[in-house]
Image (spheres, rainbow, N blue to C red):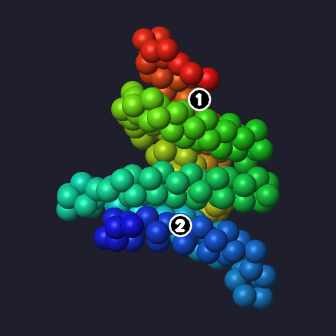
Amino acid sequence: MPFNLPILLTWLRVALIPICVAVFFLPDSILLLHSRNAVGAGIFALAAATDWLDGYLARKLGQTSAFGAFLDPVADKLIVAAALILLVQLGRTEGWMAMIIIGREITISALREWMAGMGSRSSVAVAYIGKLKTAAQMLAITLLLYDGALVPGLDARGLGNFSMYVAVILTLWSMIYYLQMAAKEFAGKKIDV
């Protein structure tokens, strides 16, 4: 297993998951609700930033690796799934939205694995729509975790809910896109099921 700065940042993202979740279950005697929201949202935002930073550094420093390529999307999906489940538990987002996002992540991960086994992983490589989807999810989750006033007259929950609807639409759109790309590959190959 290679160990370098990008992989360290990815492991940091994984380590931040239980910390982010645990913050929301601290009693008021340790941390008041508004502070829990701010700290939890900050931890999640830090984790989201490492998602961009680890990939950038891996390319910039020439430290890409098969292990890093495996670990990075796993870390992304774990932190998003944990945060969505937490938001449903806290009553800040709808369960059906979390199910769509988590279901899409499982589906596309399985599709990529299958395509890799067929030697066609590049046909379902990350596309721009996938990057937009990720950005919308990270923004929505951060806002809903914060759940406070951003500026007078604009609260994080309202903007977070709007962003979550955008994220769900982009999630479905990107899933359809990747399934269409895979279907083109399937059309030209005999598939063993």
Q: Residue at x 34, y 60 (%)?
A: 53
Residue 74 percent location from the top left of the image? 52, 54
The foreground one among 46 and 126 is 126
Which disc number belongs to residue 172? 1
Q: Residue furthest left?
A: 61
Q: Residue at x 58, y 59 (%)?
A: 79
Quadrant in the picture for residue 56: bottom left
Residue 137 seen: yes
Left or right? Give the position of 36 relative to 109.
right
Q: Determine whether the residue tagged by mark 1 lies in a helix, strand or loop.
A: helix
Query: How many residues crowd mark 1 within 10 Å: few (<14), some (14–19), many (20+)?
Result: some
Query: How many residues crowd mark 2 within 10 Å: few (<14), some (14–19), many (20+)?
Result: many
The foreground one among 176 and 142 is 176
Nearest-to-viewer mark from 1 and 2: 2
Sequence-first disc among 1 and 2: 2
Q: Label 1 amino acid?
A: Leu
Residue 14 percent location from the top left of the image? 53, 66
Residue 59 percent location from the top left of the image? 24, 54
Q: Residue furthest bottom?
A: 29
Q: Determine whether the residue tagged by mark 2 lies in a helix, strand or loop.
A: helix
Q: Residue at x 59, y 67 (%)?
A: 17
Q: Label 2 amino acid?
A: Val
Confirm or deny contact between disc 1 and disc 2 (CB under 8 A).
no
- Figure quadrant of the N terminus: bottom left
Which disc number belongs to residue 14? 2
Residue 129 seen: no
Vertical position of residue 101 compared to residue 157: above or below: above
Quadrant in the picture for residue 172: top right
Label 1 to label 2: alpha-carbon separation: 25 Å
